[in-house]
């Protein structure tokens, strides 16, 4: 069976996407491993060159306090947004209920009016 047209393109695209896993070559894996080791060891050397009071005071006190205040600000903002959304939803629901009630009353009134006019004409 020879595929032509859109079916052939579809099959070729599928075979390209789901081709077999060839795995990485050993040389590439070795290069990636060496690169990871170099970057990791350089980060450790950089962190050891920082003064110890910089790490202990800033990391333990200031950063945690700033993180706490930032998270509390985020939660306060989200709570304000949620309250506003709830109020808007309740306003929309109340307007829909009021409009629905008015519409039903108008339907009932128009039915009574049409029934009374039919009874008078008979």
Image: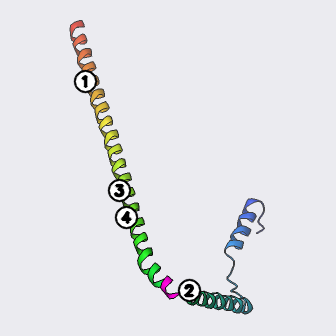
Q: Secondary structure at mark 3?
A: helix
The residue to which callout 1 is attached is: 108
Mark 4 surroundings: few (<14), some (14-19) or many (≥20) residues within 10 A = few
Residue 111: name its quadrant: top left
The residue to which callout 2 is attached is: 50
Nearest to the observer: residue 102 or residue 113: 102
Image quarter where the C terminus lies is top left
Nearest to the observer: residue 98 or residue 54: 54
Query: Is tag 4's residue or tag 1's residue first in the polypeptide sequence?
Result: 4
Q: Which mark is residue 92?
A: none
The residue to which callout 3 is attached is: 79
Magenta stretch: includes residue 52: yes
Q: What is the spatial separation of the Cα atoms under label 3 and label 1, in whole angstroms?
A: 43 Å
Marks 4 and 3: CB-CB under 8 Å?
A: no
Mark 3 surroundings: few (<14), some (14-19) or many (≥20) residues within 10 A = few
Marks 2 and 3: CB-CB under 8 Å?
A: no
Residues in magenta?
Answer: 50-54
Q: Secondary structure at mark 1?
A: helix
Query: Is tag 2's residue or tag 3's residue first in the polypeptide sequence?
Result: 2
Decide if residue 115 is on the left or right side of residue 26.
Answer: left
Q: Which mark is residue 72?
A: 4
Question: At 68% across and 72% down in the image, what residue appears?
Answer: 17
Image quarter where the N terminus lies is bottom right
Query: Is tag 3's residue or tag 1's residue first in the polypeptide sequence?
Result: 3
In this view, the residue farthest toward the top is: 121
Q: What is the spatial separation of the Cα atoms under label 1 and label 2, in whole angstroms?
A: 82 Å
| Mark closer to the observer (2, 4) | 2
Where does the image place residue 47, in percent across and percent down from the top left? 56, 87
Q: Is residue 120 above or below residue 57?
A: above
């Amino acid at each position: 069976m020879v595929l032509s047209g859109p079916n052939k393109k579809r099959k070729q695209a599928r075979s390209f996407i789901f081709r077999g896993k060839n795995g990485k070559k050993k040389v590439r894996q070795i290069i990636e491993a060496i690169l990871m080791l170099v970057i990791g060891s350089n980060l450790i050397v950089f962190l050891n060159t920082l003064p110890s009071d910089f790490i202990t005071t800033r990391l333990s006190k200031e950063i945690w306090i700033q993180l706490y205040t930032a998270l509390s600000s985020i939660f306060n903002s989200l709570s304000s947004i949620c309250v506003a959304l709830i109020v808007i939803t309740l306003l929309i629901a109340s307007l829909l209920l009021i409009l629905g009630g008015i519409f039903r009353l108008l339907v009932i009134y128009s039915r009574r009016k049409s029934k009374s006019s039919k009874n008078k004409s008979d």
